[in-house]
Amino acid sequence: MHNKNLMRKITTYILALVSVVTIFTSCKKEYETVEELDDKNIQTYKAANSSLSFTDTAGYSYAITEEGSGAHVLNSDSVYYSYAFKSITGAVYNQTSDLMIPGTFLGYTDQFAIGSTAYLFKPVREVLAKLKRGGRATLLLPSRMAFGKNGLSNFGIGSNETIVVELGLYTYEKRHEVDGFEISTFIARNNLTLATDPSGVKFNINAEGTGTDVITEKSTVVVNYTVRSLDGLVLEAATGYTTRLDMPGLYKGWTIMIPKLTSGGKMRMVLPTHLGQGRPLDFDIEVTSVTND
């Protein structure tokens, strides 16, 4: 009887020990599985894109597809850049546009605000730093360095997804150079015919108006207008907006361009950054009345 009780205790102890080992092994395996899944996804992408020469470093892989020209940029250098976040099968989650080019210091290119959450993708900055202006690269960002097991449902990113990030540096170093590129791209894509004012504003007068009062900077005008970003997003619209053209804070481009009209006049104009408010802007504007004191 004593031996039977002893055997039961030994058996219970062994089963408990096996259970603990199994749980520990399962937890350890679950962690390893994330890395294995990341590696599998990365290897799958590499196999499907064998023309690219990848370098593995610090937990991620990258391939420079175009080195660019000139000197490598430094963290303190101002850069204009592009990115496209994709799945390994090519689905686009988020990307920049040639009409809305982001710009900042290279040292800040790893910072992203997605919804109300801030993300830091250090490999993005590290890969951009390996390029010269005009260069391009492909970054394979494993899930543990991207959106992890939770993914990002608002963008369709699932659990433990490896993210392909296509990166590029524009050759431009100055804001006015980027303005010129964005505006010319906008005009070409929309098949527009616009004149160029000496100030740099691109415009087309649809109707000069029939009023007799000449508009000057001292005039008070009532206008209807719609303003859009170059990608077509309506930023603001107003009917019957009243203002003097010398009011502080008014779009500088209005002071220059509205005097080309009289009451009843209509114009489309594209303002460069220095005449808008921080970005090139696309306006439709109609003058409905003019008052001169």
Image (tube, rainbow, N blue to C red):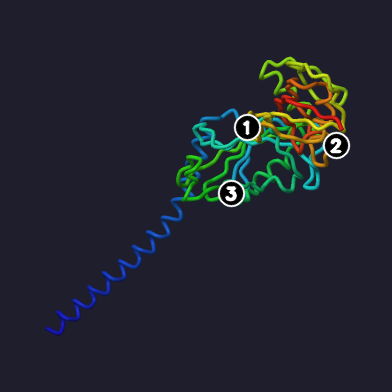
Name the foreground residue: 218 vs 78: 218
Q: Identify the image quadrant of the N terminus.
A: bottom left
Lower sequence index among marks 3 and 2:
3
Query: What SS does tag 1 mark?
Result: loop
Which image quadrant is residue 30 in?
A: bottom left
CA–CA distance between discs 2 and 1?
27 Å
Amino acid at dot 1:
Leu
Q: Which residue shows up at 58% across the image and 40% down it?
A: 140
Mark seen at residue 246: 2
- Residue 109 in picture, x, y percent from top left: 70, 45
Lower sequence index among marks 2 and 1:
1
Lower sequence index among marks 1 and 3:
3
Query: What SS does tag 3 mark?
Result: loop
CA–CA distance between discs 3 and 2?
57 Å
Name the foreground residue: 224 vs 276: 224
Name the foreground residue: 186 vs 122: 186
Tell me if 228 is positioned left or right of 117 in this view. Answer: right
Is residue 217 depicted above or below 10 in this figure? Answer: above
CB contact under 8 Å: marks 3 and 2 = no
CA–CA distance between discs 1 and 3?
38 Å
- What residue sits right under mark 3 in the picture? 59
2 vs 1, front mark: 2
Mark seen at residue 39: none
3 vs 2, front mark: 2
- Residue 269 in picture, x, y percent from top left: 75, 24
Query: What SS does tag 2 mark?
Result: loop
Q: Residues within 10 Å of mark 3 (few under 14, many from 20)?
A: some
- What residue sits right under mark 1 in the picture? 233
Please indicate, yes or no, whether residue 51 appears anywhere in the rendered image: yes
Q: Identify the image quadrant of the C terminus.
A: top right
